[in-house]
């Protein structure tokens, strides 16, 4: 009886360890906190982003951007995990740009932050 319990426990632990690997990073995503996007503001003809890093040990923070009338986001920039603001000098057209961010640690990503939009020509 004692050996059977050890075997069952070992099997459960092994199965759990195997199920957390692979390409599905949803378990890793749940453990990382997304940054909180605080502001996207027009500045010098471009947009300045400011955020709060909720996950203090991110390797990097990635920002994605989409222009008005786009349905999907593209990578705008990636900065070291301890950075909390950046000027997006590529966002210069007179239109709305929407941003979202996420924390990257190793191969894991957080969920996306809130979305914030602005036009670099609104003053």
Image: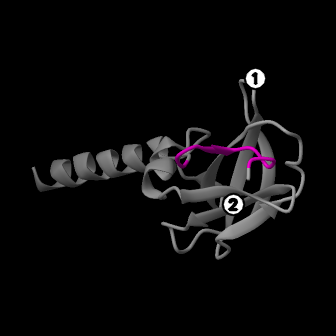
Mark 1 lies on residue: 69
Q: Quadrant of residue 119?
A: top right
The segment highlighted magenta reads 113-122
Residue 97 visible at all: yes
Residue at horizontal 55%, vertical 59%? 38
Outermost residue toward the left in this view: 1
The magenta stretch spans residue 119: yes
Q: Quadrant of residue 67?
A: top right
Q: Secondary structure at mark 2?
A: strand
By secondary structure, the bulk of the magenta-drawn segment is best described as loop
Residue 106: give x, y in percent of width and height: 65, 62
Q: Residue 41 got which mark?
A: none
Residue 27: give x, y in percent of width and height: 45, 47
Residue at horizontal 64%, vertical 71%? 84
In the shown orientation, is residue 11 left or right of residue 116?
left
Mark 2 lies on residue: 49
Q: Residues within 10 Å of mark 1 (few under 14, many from 20)?
A: few
């Amino acid at each position: 009886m004692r050996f059977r319990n050890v075997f069952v426990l070992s099997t459960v632990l092994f199965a759990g360890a195997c199920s957390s690997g692979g390409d599905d990073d949803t378990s890793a995503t749940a453990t990382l906190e997304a940054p909180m996007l605080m502001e996207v503001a027009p500045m010098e003809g471009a947009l300045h982003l400011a955020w709060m890093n909720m996950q203090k040990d991110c390797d990097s923070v990635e920002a994605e951007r989409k222009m008005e009338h786009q349905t999907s986001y593209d990578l705008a920039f990636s900065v070291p995990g301890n950075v909390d603001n950046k000027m997006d000098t590529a966002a210069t057209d007179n239109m709305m740009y929407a941003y979202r961010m996420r924390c990257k640690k190793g191969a894991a990503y957080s969920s996306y932050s809130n979305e914030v939009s602005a036009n670099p020509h609104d003053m």
